[in-house]
Amino acid sequence: MGNKLKSIAVYCGHEFGYNPAFAREAAVIGEFLGKNNIRMVFGGGDVGLMGTVATAALDAGGEVVGVSTANVIEKQEPVHNGVQVEIVDGVNERKQKMFELSDAFIILPGGIGTLNELTDIMTMQQIGESKKPLFFLNTAGFWIPFVRLFIHMKNNGFIESIHDYNIHGANTANDLIHRIIKYQN
């Protein structure tokens, strides 16, 4: 067993999105993390997909750690009950803390914040600062436009090598869980 993942950050929306499959699949991921004693690190909110995945992990007996900012909590997200949330000074410090606390990252559907967190990790991979794996859950084809953009950047000479990235994708939560387990073995 070479790549034991003890802590995974989950990046996802603070909204549910329009497709009910987003929340169903988020709950499956949270349950997997909780049942397998993989600590979940997330943004700390009890809203949208973020709240769904955290609640499922907690209900399955998992450890859940939140990292947020006073601004974020004040403006949009109540703190998730049952989770100790570390309050940091700003969004960049939040991302850094979540990175430090995590061995890997799961990317679920989300908005600009999710995209920002994702591209920060990819940038660190590209310049060699990190090889921590990214696991994409492409529920209902949500991430297909991003994949097309990535290929477009590669085809136009802005991404030198796809081998700079440690990315694993799946279309269903069960498929993604299989990939995470496979990665660990």
Image (tube, rainbow, N blue to C red):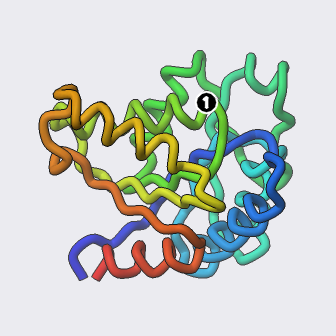
Front-most of residues 67 and 18: 18
Front-most of residues 56 and 111: 111
Work out whether 77 lies above or below 45: above
Work out whether 27 lies above or below 101: below
Q: Position of residue 16 (x, y in %)?
A: 81, 48
Q: Is residue 135 left or right of residue 82?
A: left
Front-most of residues 107 and 132: 107
Q: Residue at x 73, y 59 (%)?
A: 22
Q: Residue at x 59, y 57 (%)?
A: 141
Q: Residue at x 48, y 57 (%)?
A: 136
| Secondary structure at numbered mark 1 | helix
Q: Quadrant of the N terminus?
A: bottom left
Q: Position of residue 109 (x, y in %)?
A: 64, 49
Q: Quadrant of the C terminus?
A: bottom left
User: Looking at the picture, which amino acid does disc 1 mark?
Assistant: Gly
Work out whether 70 lies above or below 118: above
Q: Position of residue 103 (x, y in %)?
A: 37, 56
* Number of numbered discs visible in the structure rendering: 1
Q: Residue at x 39, y 53 (%)?
A: 134
Q: Residues within 10 Å of mark 1 (few under 14, many from 20)?
A: some
- Report which residue position mark 1 lands on: 113
Task: Give the quadrant of residue 73.
Answer: top right
Q: Position of residue 81 (x, y in %)?
A: 85, 50
